[in-house]
Image: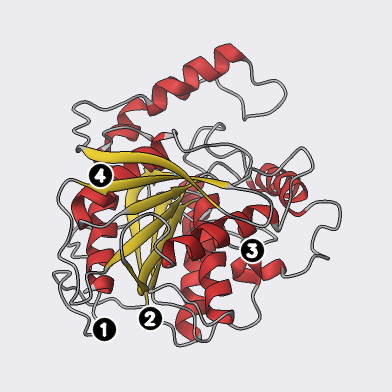
Amino acid sequence: MRTARTNGTTRDGAPVVLNDAPEKLGRLAGVHAERVHVLDGLPPRGPAFTAAHQAQAALYDRPVEPIDLPEVERRDEAAPGPHGEVPVRIYTPCRLAEPDAEGRRGAVVWIHGGAFIFGDLDTVEADHTATRLADATGLPVISVGYRLAGGGVHHPVPHDDCWAAYRWVRGGGHGLPTDPERVIVGGGSAGACLAASVGLHGRDAALAPAGVLLIYPLLHYPLTEPSGELAAVLDTLPPLLYAGPEASRVQNDELMAILLGPAMTDVEHLDYAMPGNADDLTGYPRTYIENCECDALRASGERFAAQLAEAGVDVETHTVAGETHGHLSVPGLPSATTTCEHATAFITDVVH
């Protein structure tokens, strides 16, 4: 992993994100530390989690004013895919980046999270993140409304939808002349997993994205065990945020049963469902990973970064100090806007 610091303007092998502050504090910090008391008395999510519980939990992720969301043009379209049309939303900045000599630009494909079973194009993690990235980079950002797992839908359908949308963007289906060699794919949580799978599929098909952007990703099955340092941080959290190692394993197994379907791990291309399970990551695209310190999934993000580095891949990883999983879902949260700034530095470095 690259550990030197730079100003985000070079491609000389140094990181693009400059961060002089500590990335690990061993505790919650910031807005969520101020709000964590609202979760007192709440049980872990499950059948006993009531509407009243949900209303109380929502106070933890309420908007932080001012939100200051930039103005961009939004347009809904659909990309063709093997399972039918894939809804996409195209975010075009008011001020586009300068095109190359052939009139082309790069583009960003963004994939929302939601444990593979929740979320859509209107969720904050999808809409606000795409808006901020489009405005800051000057590039079109295409958010993907992939089919969610459940109700008979399972792997490879979500991956196929994201791969189809990525191919469509490479071909300029979003309406702007595009350099296919400068298309970046990224996502948050389950969306980061899907983005990573597009990166792996792209490598295999000689259609690799220029870069892969992963925010608090889940990338392995079975669930990666936390280090002693991470376990100590997790033990400071209330049950709603972390219910313990056994409950986390059970919850993840249930989720994987929905995503993978009846065959579970006996599926074709398990690595396209869980890219961290790939046998070989040699030749994987340049990657940026940003984990949250107080998040059990940090173990997976850190492990994937180590796998990439071992395979000789250009990978940069950072940790959002004192933050919990899913911070991109909170409108106006300072740590979320900072993560978007870091993502912008990576995107800009890749396309230029």
The residue labelled by disc 2 is 314
Nearer-N-terminus badge (4/1): 1
**Inter-mark Cα distance, 2 to 3:** 20 Å
| Distance of label 4 from label 1 (alpha carbons) | 25 Å
Instruction: Classify 267 as above or below 341.
Output: below
Q: Which residue is mark 3?
A: 274
Horizontal relation, residue 11 to residue 213: left or right: left
Evaluate whether residue 316 shows in this view. Answer: no
Classify mark 2: residues with Cα within 10 Å, few (<14), some (14-19) or many (20+).
Answer: many
Q: Say if mark 1 contacts mark 2, CB within 8 Å.
A: yes
User: Badge 1 is on which residue?
Assistant: 13
| Amino acid type, mark 3 | Met
How far apart are the two marked residues, 2 and 4, measured between alpha carbons? 25 Å
Asked if disc 4 and disc 1 are in contact, CB closer than 8 Å, the reply is no
Mark 4 closeness class: few <14, some 14–19, many ≥20 residues within 10 Å: many
Q: Is residue 22 left or right of residue 120?
A: left
Mark toward the start of the polypeptide (2 vs 4): 2
Residue beneath the point at 80% across and 51% down: 261
Foreground residue, 251 or 134? 134
Q: CA distance from mark 1 to mark 3?
A: 27 Å
Name the image quarter holding residue 46. top right
User: What is the three-letter code of the residue carrying label 4?
Assistant: Thr
* Relative depth, front residue between 199 and 146: 146
Residue 71 in the image: state x and y as whole percent.
20, 37
Which residue is labeled 4 in the image?
Answer: 337
SS type, badge 3: loop
Label 3 neighbour load within 10 Å: few <14, some 14-19, many 20+: many
The quadrant of the picture occupied by the N terminus is bottom left
- Answer above or below: position of 7 versus 93: below
Real-space Cα separation, disc 4 to disc 3, in angstroms:
28 Å
Q: Could you say whether the residue bearing mark 1 is in a helix, strand or loop?
A: loop
Q: Is residue 106 visible?
A: yes
